[in-house]
Image (spheres, grey):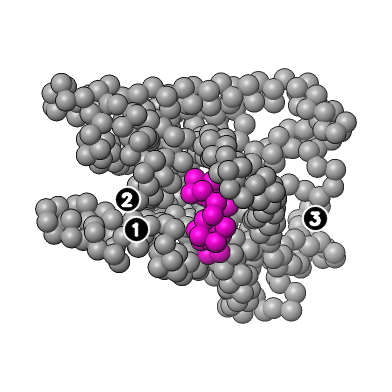
Amino acid sequence: MKRFIETLQNIWKIKDLRDRIIFALGMIAIYRFGSYVVLPGVNPEVLQSAAGQGGANDLLDLVNMFAGGAFNRAAVFALGIMPYITASIIIQLMGFAVPYFQRLQQKEGESGRKKITQITRLLTLAITLVQGGAYLTYVRSQGAVDPTIPPGIFWLANIIILSTGTIFAMWLGERITDKGIGNGISLLIMIGIIATLPGSLIAEFITQLNGGGLIIFVLELAALFFVTMVTVLVIQGIRKIPLQFAKRMVGRGINMPVSGVRDYIPVKVAAAGVMPIIFAQAIMFIPSTVAQFVGGQTGADIATNPLVQSLSDPFAVPYNIIYFFLVVAFTFVYTALLVNPTQYADYLKRQNAFIPGVKPGKPTADFIDTVTSRVTLPGSIFLGLISILPAVVYLLFGVNQTFAFFFGGTSLLILVGVVLDTLQQIESHLLMRKYDGLVKSGKLKGRSSMQTIGSDL
């Protein structure tokens, strides 16, 4: 405890780090304030009452969690930062498939990145307009709109407000990244998730107090801690493929063999991160989305079909069986897009490096591909289990739905990933100024800590 207090004091002593943390906290406070400013002409109590009934709104509970509760409050940040995340994912996928975006990402350097950023922002605005219209349709369907307001004025004003709110939230995230600490966009998502934790924790405490007792509640907290620690281990876990450099340039251009100089290619157990779960969730939204857009009696029949209802309920058994296999499949697909064994092999050949016992060229690419596939298999199964864990604890142990989301899925992976990355950046500031780091032994492995040959690709 004494060492922890000393570390906090050291953080406060570093002016640059202190200013960055204070700036980030200020931006987060502004974001949270906007999550409580209600759209004009909307009664948020009606939305919250409808959300509390569950059923058809179970999937929307997850959306509300990422927005920090602003979705059910009909706030100006009701859409949160999710349109920007959607746009970023689309641009990233296009970078794998479209030559124009591949050229921007890989060959045009800083100018290419600026152009991609501009395209992402424009796409974010377009997605916000579409999602904003869908959200206002949902608000009106719940009877939460003041009938005295003309529909035209209501739609025009609130579409503009929702779009402005999302763009402003995106700007806040970018400012946190530039002048604060950590990845700003990820921090805003994490804050939105954490904001729903106290309420769900209190609700679960009251439920167990009236039912199972405090011992069950303590066991649930212990289980949540255990799941979080296992998630940290898996996210941090890597398989190191050793490298050896045959010769390096020393002195006046003389080739000298360098013995004992080794590096490694890090193959992460969960290289795909949270992306497979996001893709799988998008697929699972299709049944309910089709039912909403068909309309009329046909749409009503589809929505009330038992199979469609089970595929739209994140706590139903059929939903989770399909969800699990989708996450496993998408993990392999996304990892294959991220890890290019041929590119690794070519890079090693140019650097006069090799994997001990493996011939350069195609044998090296095949070896890296085999190792990646073997490491991805347990990682994909873990992601699949994490994705369905909220349903498991809800169905088998009676944990309330909101609190169950914290036992797995995107919420847990985002929380763990963002916290590790932010701590790693703080650790870097401390070590750079000769202070002790946040951990006494070992090493925090954030995105920027992988100083290996793989980061150059």
Q: Residue at image x 58%, y 43%?
A: 210
Identify which residue, 150 or 169, lies in the foreground: 150
> Is residue 358 inside the magenta stretch?
no
Alpha-carbon span between mark 1 and mark 3:
63 Å
Image position of 301 (left or right of 131) = left
Examine the rendering and report whether any part of residue 248 can be seen.
yes
Q: Residue at image x 28%, y 38%?
A: 135
* Quarter containing the N terminus: top right
Q: Secondary structure at mark 2?
A: helix
Q: Secondary structure at mark 1?
A: loop
Query: Which residue has dot 3 on it?
Result: 250
Magenta residue span: 384-408
For the residues bearing labels 2 and 1, Cβ distance under 8 angstroms? yes
Q: Position of residue 274 (x, y in %)?
A: 52, 54
* Quarter containing the C terminus: bottom right
- The type of residue carrying mark 2 is Ala
Q: Point out the tag, 1 or 3, that comes first from the N-terminus.
A: 3
- The type of residue carrying mark 1 is Ser
Q: Position of residue 84 (x, y in %)?
A: 40, 40
Q: Secondary structure at mark 3?
A: strand
Query: Which residue has dot 2 on it?
Result: 56
> Is residue 391 inside the magenta stretch?
yes
